[in-house]
Image (cartoon, rainbow, N blue to C red):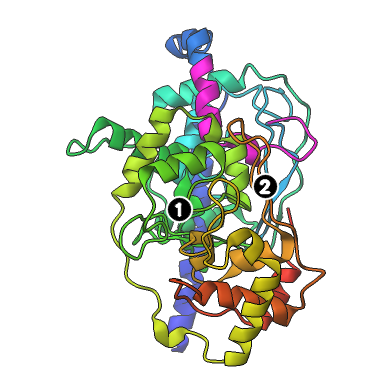
Amino acid sequence: MKSLRLLWVPTVFAIMVIAAWWWHHQRSSVGPKAEDPAVAAAMKDAKVIARGRYLTLAGDCVSCHSVAGGQPYAGGRALLTPFGNIPVPNITPDPETGLGNWRFENFWRALHTGMGIGGEPLYPAFSYTSFTKITREDAVAIFAYLQTLPPVHQPPEPLGLRFPYNVRGALTAWRAMYFKSGTYQPDPKQSAAWNRGAYLVQGLGHCNECHAARDTWGGIDTRASLAGGEIPAQNWYAPDLSMQAHGGLHGWTGQDIVDLLKTGQSSKGVAFGPMADVVASSTQYLSDADLHAMADYLQSLPARQPQVDDALRVSSKAVADRGAAIYGQGCAACHGTDGQGVPGVYPPLDGNASVLEPIGVNATRAVLLGGFAPSTAANPRPYSMPPYAQQLSDADVAAVVTYIRQAWSNRVTPVLERDVIKYRHTPVD
């Protein structure tokens, strides 16, 4: 055992030396150069710029690269992760703090390979694990549009990662385990619409970055794409997107998907939490053809294994009765005694994906903090749910959420009082 421990030290040292050499090699091979003539011509084309604006909206770039009250795309915020805070860069064409000195090849390298202008590996809070699927033609259009934005001088926030996560060389091992570059390759067995939907969901829309589980090191579990997962450090659960048996969207139609992404609500539920931001700043602007294409792709996701059974239902009659009473007093007037809600106004709770997600955080936070649907062009004045954090105790919230998760056709695990205590004190971005 002692010899193995002694062997570990030079092994780690060798890995660090190799990583340092590789990083130096990458740095020496990049940097601002003269723009390719074809790219330069495309970047002046009004149609290319207009398409780049559309693609930038489809990628929801503004949500991360903006701070509340600040200039769009100018950065200024830090993303909270389990490993510390990661600053979001300014992507306006400011020469000192933005992309003003970048050439398209630098931008393409960042999207496609996750490498910065100086050859440094980028932290995967920037979703290059999905953006690598973006085609070069689309990347040119996006870059062309970004270069037309008003330049904003906005230095980045300092890196807030803890050791050893703040050592960029360590990303070499992470990338080897979790990242494979490559643009999206159409499936010849599928329709053009299906392939367009797959491209948007897998690549530009980067849906799997939230709607998939992550391991201890922040890597995405690729065994079940879009199978749902807790969003790290935010205490929201992005539900499974399968529409087949036991999927998070089982029972939804393609039109339900389109309605939710276009308006923020459908006959099956309402977008709230992080998804409300996605609808408000991104998907409401997509064409009907692209939204239907995304729905076509999601309909093809496989069936899932059942997560729970009746044995996991709460056995305490006292908790069930308490939850039923609270629901009758504060919830039934809008959502109905049958949990069906009011079409187009209040969402149903029976079979609702946000109610049925595995850990119960979404329904708990909705009861505590309220549920705020996005304002969209098609639904500019949506109804919202008021918060009940001041009126209900932790035990009350646990009881009513448990009741909702086990009433009607719902059959999922109860929520415990200790969970409510945790979610009550979750910071709100």
Q: Is residue 58 magenta?
A: yes
Badge 1 is on which residue? 175
Query: Is any part of residue 344 visible from this angle?
Result: yes
Which residue type does callout 2 highlight?
Answer: Tyr
In the image, residue 235 above or below residue 306: above
At 51% from the left and 36% from the top, the residue drawn is: 262
Q: Which residues are magenta?
A: 50-72
Q: Quadrant of residue 281?
A: top right
Q: Which quarter of the rendering shows the N terminus?
A: bottom left
Which residue type does callout 1 highlight?
Answer: Arg
Q: In the rendered view, does 301 fall on the left or right side of 31?
A: left
Mark 1 or mark 2, whichever is nearer to me? 2
**Tag shown at residue 133:** none
Query: Is any part of residue 218 visible from this angle?
Result: no
Q: In front: 400, or 213?
A: 400
Badge 2 is on which residue? 383
List x then y, in percent, for residue 80.
Answer: 68, 56
List x then y, in percent, for residue 272.
Answer: 61, 51
In the image, residue 421 above or below residue 352: below
List x then y, in percent, for residue 389.
Answer: 77, 68
Q: In front: 397, or 239?
A: 397
Q: Earlier in the sequence, mark 1 or mark 2?
A: 1
How far is disc 1 from disc 2 in space, using C-alphas? 44 Å
Of helix, strand and loop, which one carries label 1? Answer: helix
